[in-house]
Amino acid sequence: MPKEKILIVEDEKELAELVRDYLHAEGYEAILSYDGEEGLALFHKENPVMAVLDIMLPKMDGIEVCRRIREESNVPILMMSAKKSDTDKIIGLGIGADDYITKPFSPGELVARIKAHLRRYKHFSRPKEEADDNLIEYKDLKLDVKRHELFVRDEKVNLSATEFKLLHLLLSHRGQVFSKEQLYDRIWGYTSYGDINTVTVYMSKIRDKIERDSTKPEYVQTVWGVGYKFSDFS
């Protein structure tokens, strides 16, 4: 059985090779690139199941690589950044990244995140005969689980893999309130490592894509002091 391919685009060769070795030990095939242009070309050539991108790259930065990948694919994308500020993190999430990790990091932590994203991606990509509720229609929304497609008022709206998983979870449990911790655990699966405020960022992004007025949300509602729920109005 062929090994699943994971694209690593990182200009620090020693770090890239270290991550490759850890992934090989877990049974994955790591495809390495040291600049953004080559990384994008390898994405098209190798068809990896996930991409791990450094933000600061020669020739084409990781933000642009992420944006171009997201235009044609919903595979999980994890961004790496050496900066301590949240600016690059939020920008990365804003153009379709599913997660970020700040350097320096433990290779073991990175591999844990990669495996968690792939588990969730595969779960939401199951064949029709295995999947539950492949087509969810509610008011102006239509979520096609099999094709990973969302239609809002009959117009197709692009979602990242993580946006899709969050929306699917909420839409499948209309009226149920989830805390940030519950959402983070269900979607990312490694609460001890991550930033719980990432949930807030994603909720804002989802609202921008599905609400008529994101400042007065009809669908994704905040339950103050508790968390979020998807409206169950009839």
Image (spheres, grey):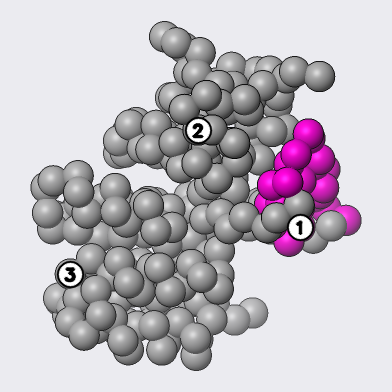
Left or right, 225 with reference to 125: left
Is label 2 or label 3 in front?
Answer: 2
Asked whether residue 7 appears in the rendered view, the answer is yes
Q: Is residue 131 magenta?
A: yes
Q: Which residue is mark 2?
A: 214
Q: Which residues are magenta?
A: 129-153
Q: Which residue is mark 3?
A: 56
Spatial separation of the CA atoms under disc 2 and disc 1: 27 Å
Q: Residues within 10 Å of mark 3 (few under 14, many from 20)?
A: some
Asked whether residue 143 appears in the rendered view, the answer is no
SS class, disc 3:
loop
Between 152 and 104, which is closer to the camera in this rendering?
A: 152
Work out whether 130 lies above or below 179: below
Work out whether 98 lies above or below 24: above
State the quadrant of the C terminus.
top right
Hey, which residue is sitting farthest right in the picture?
129
Spatial separation of the CA atoms under disc 2 and disc 3: 32 Å
The quarter of the picture where residue 212 lies is top right
Q: Name the amino acid, label 2.
A: Ser
Q: Name the amino acid, label 1.
A: Lys
The quarter of the picture where residue 168 lies is top right
The residue at 39%/58% (across/down) is 95
Residue 200 at x, y percent in the picture: 39, 31
The residue at 35%/74% (across/down) is 65
Q: Is residue 102 magenta?
A: no
Residue 30 at x, y percent in the picture: 39, 77
Q: Which residue is mark 1?
A: 146
Residue 79 at x, y percent in the picture: 31, 60
Q: Name the amino acid, label 3.
A: Met
The quarter of the picture where residue 61 lies is bottom left
